[in-house]
Amino acid sequence: MINPFFKNNGPFKISDILQLINLDDLKIVNDQKIADIKDLFTSEKNDITFFHSKKYKEIAKNTKASFCITTENLKNELPKNCKPLLVKNVLVSTSKVTSKFYPNSINDNFDYTAKDIAETKFQDKVKFGKNVLIGNNVNIGANCLIGHNSIIEQNVSIGDNCSIGSNVIIRNTLINNNVRVLDNCVIGKHGFGFFPINEKNLRYPHIGFVIIAENCEIGCGCTIDRGSMSNTVIGKNTFLDNQVHIAHNVKIGENSIIAGQVGIAGSSILGNNIRIGGQAGISGHLTIGNNVEIAGGSGVIKDISDNSKVMGYPAKNIRDFLKNNK
Amino acid sequence: MINPFFKNNGPFKISDILQLINLDDLKIVNDQKIADIKDLFTSEKNDITFFHSKKYKEIAKNTKASFCITTENLKNELPKNCKPLLVKNVLVSTSKVTSKFYPNSINDNFDYTAKDIAETKFQDKVKFGKNVLIGNNVNIGANCLIGHNSIIEQNVSIGDNCSIGSNVIIRNTLINNNVRVLDNCVIGKHGFGFFPINEKNLRYPHIGFVIIAENCEIGCGCTIDRGSMSNTVIGKNTFLDNQVHIAHNVKIGENSIIAGQVGIAGSSILGNNIRIGGQAGISGHLTIGNNVEIAGGSGVIKDISDNSKVMGYPAKNIRDFLKNNK
Amino acid sequence: MINPFFKNNGPFKISDILQLINLDDLKIVNDQKIADIKDLFTSEKNDITFFHSKKYKEIAKNTKASFCITTENLKNELPKNCKPLLVKNVLVSTSKVTSKFYPNSINDNFDYTAKDIAETKFQDKVKFGKNVLIGNNVNIGANCLIGHNSIIEQNVSIGDNCSIGSNVIIRNTLINNNVRVLDNCVIGKHGFGFFPINEKNLRYPHIGFVIIAENCEIGCGCTIDRGSMSNTVIGKNTFLDNQVHIAHNVKIGENSIIAGQVGIAGSSILGNNIRIGGQAGISGHLTIGNNVEIAGGSGVIKDISDNSKVMGYPAKNIRDFLKNNK
């Protein structure tokens, strides 16, 4: 799939990439062109990838990438076709290389291509409010409404029968049919991801996007950040109440209900038919099973298996929690 | 009181209503016209009502409605004047009937009647910023200010000496005198209420509105949802800090102080002179007495009696909490 | 430093001030003019100050102010050059006097001086979106971007290389170089500070402002309130995620990372290199040391010393918390 939002500025010669990550001294036989940077699994020949944790050992063994940013400790897991590039901090080096391929994915400046919808091809196709702005190359399906002062940035795609509220900002997002996005949402900005370096943090690129499946409703004032290397996904028929925050790379399943002011930290994966009460928080990089219920105000800091009901901080079995907290 | 926000599309013949809730087979002598759908207490003759919980038994006994959507178990509580309509799920059937009477109360699309305030009768009466939009049939009192990019949707009423900030959206709301609504608030959208049905949730109508009494202040980025069958009410001289979320049907008394990022779930009733610290949460359908203090970050999951001070999650007596958490 | 945001309407005769705080009976020899109201430390001769807590005894002894609003209990701490004005409630009286000097600091009405940026001197200097509004006497440095529908109110100053998102409102704020403010933020409104008086709360003036140091990033939907008598400060290279609320007078150090939906209550002081997880809350008037880590969802209700890691509510040593909450 070609990334609809972030243009790949490559290919680049491997010598230029090596210079960028301070490996100028590395001897290379052939100064070949590198087409793209991808993860271990999706990389093809002539791509560069990265490998920073033993957790991905099995995938690393089969990568098709020609080069891999990694460490001394991990290099032996790579196949012969993939030359290891040894660095001190894999993620920082990866960030630098990704920035070279996708320079527009670092900072989210406003979309200067946006113009008044009345000057676009949507003037007769969409029912719209005052001061609606549409960027270049936007798609909007049949029978859609867009409220006052809303901004649909370049390359965004919206399905049929969608209702976008007022004061909404949507960028880097694919919205399917029958979705409602209520007022004041900001969807698709980069996540809160960077390497803390004193005096000047290094942002890493966010080349993923947001996918909102059909029949979803996103409440007022929600923020949904786009993914870094993968996407942020809201499954079909999932409803979010007001002031919910969904961080980058989060994936939420189908038919789920997320009440007001909930926050879900980066890269957590949630199953289907989940119910989360108001103000609950879910830490990053967790897996929450199907049919899970999380009581309002809970703080989830570890994985939760299918069909569980949890409560408290740290969240535990709801019966135990209530018994211990009479 | 005639609902100023949602037009009753009735009357409808009872035969049409029966068909809608799959009771076509029910024999009726007279295909009379039904004027409205209301709760057990406010219904009049020729109205239809609903009765889904024993809790309302005493009110049911005296309802004046001609028909009542209810269950086999509850039907014997109804008076002779009121014919029971037996269904499997009272609330789903009620939702369908309410949607028939009030189709515009389901989804909150933007107000397409809104136009630039400079083109309205308020151009000389109100002090306003750039790009202010006013819907049809709005009332605004003397000596009011409305900031840039704010949207006052149709039928909203604002009293005297009010200051509305910038980027504010107000719909389905009655605002009394001397109220300040700060920037980026969204007031009066429908609540987070629906019946979870796989593949497509069924929203129930919200025909209530928001009432903000005199001398209130609503902080930046707050969301206050309107009621479903009743109203959401903020009592006089009550102040809300930034990013507070008030769900549908909530009623807050007078002289209360609600700090930043607090969330109050649907249908809870709060007394007067209440103080709620930052980020506290109150579950739905609770009753909080007068003069109650709730410490910041607390999670209230049961009723609280007058003059209590509570803290923790679940919130308990503040002395006990602090003693047990040194 | 002259306050760039709030005009001092003084000087006023001391007799007028005495009348305002119901001290008309107090005998004064010379009806001198009072230039300003300041805190004990910064007051000069011909200023009026206030002293309401023993905590400030040492500073009180050396104040240069000519008059001081205080109580019977505290008056003897003041030097001879400073005449005590004895009142029942120091803060209420101080509020009244401050309101006289700075009447525009009480309520935050929209900035009616704002006009379309295309009509200002910034039309060629700044890269801007549609419907951007700029108030009187704004400064914007080189190489800045301002997104659609954003409002920069009068007297705000923005450094070089800054990127302001869309739907942002900035008032009473000094922003240094290389700062990014993302969409939907509201920065610089007055804090949630007032004296609860039945039927009509008395707001106290907020004559402080917000200072955002260089290299900061402020996430979407954040609110940062300005200070009352001092300023609200975000130290350099500090990053805030989405939906964070920073209350008045808060000072955050350098190189800190504050995740989504965190709330920091009024007047707390945070050190450098702090990390705060999502949804954590910090009570008011606390001191948080350098290099502190606060786990997501925690509630901090007392001071935290340097290099601590805390978790829970109330937040305690993270090891103890996890040991007790397996």
Image (cartoon, coloured by chain):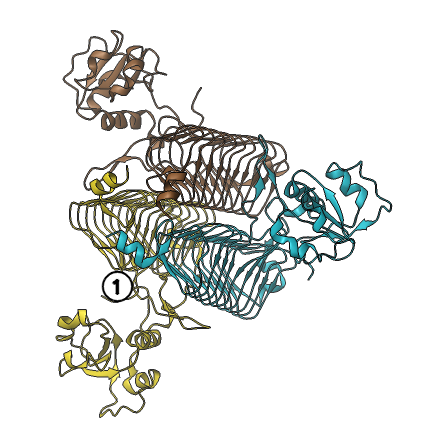
Chain colours: A cyan, B yellow, C brown
| Residue A232 drawn at (x, y percent) | 55, 57
Count of marks placed on residues: 1
Badge 1 is on which residue? B230
| Residue A174 drawn at (x, y percent) | 58, 61
Say left or right for B168 vs B18. right
Farthest residue, direction top: C80
Q: Nearer the viewer, residue A271 or A101?
A: A271
Helix, strand or loop for disc 1: loop
C43 relative to A263, above or below? above
Residue at the image position 34 percent from the left and 69 percent from the top = B205
| Residue A47 drawn at (x, y percent) | 75, 53
Residue at the image position 31 percent from the left and 47 percent from the top = B280
- Circle 1 chain: B
Say left or right for B79 vs A177. left
- Inspect the image, locate mark 1, and give the three-letter code of the amino acid beneath it: Ser
Residue at the image position 62 percent from the left and 32 percent from the top = C142
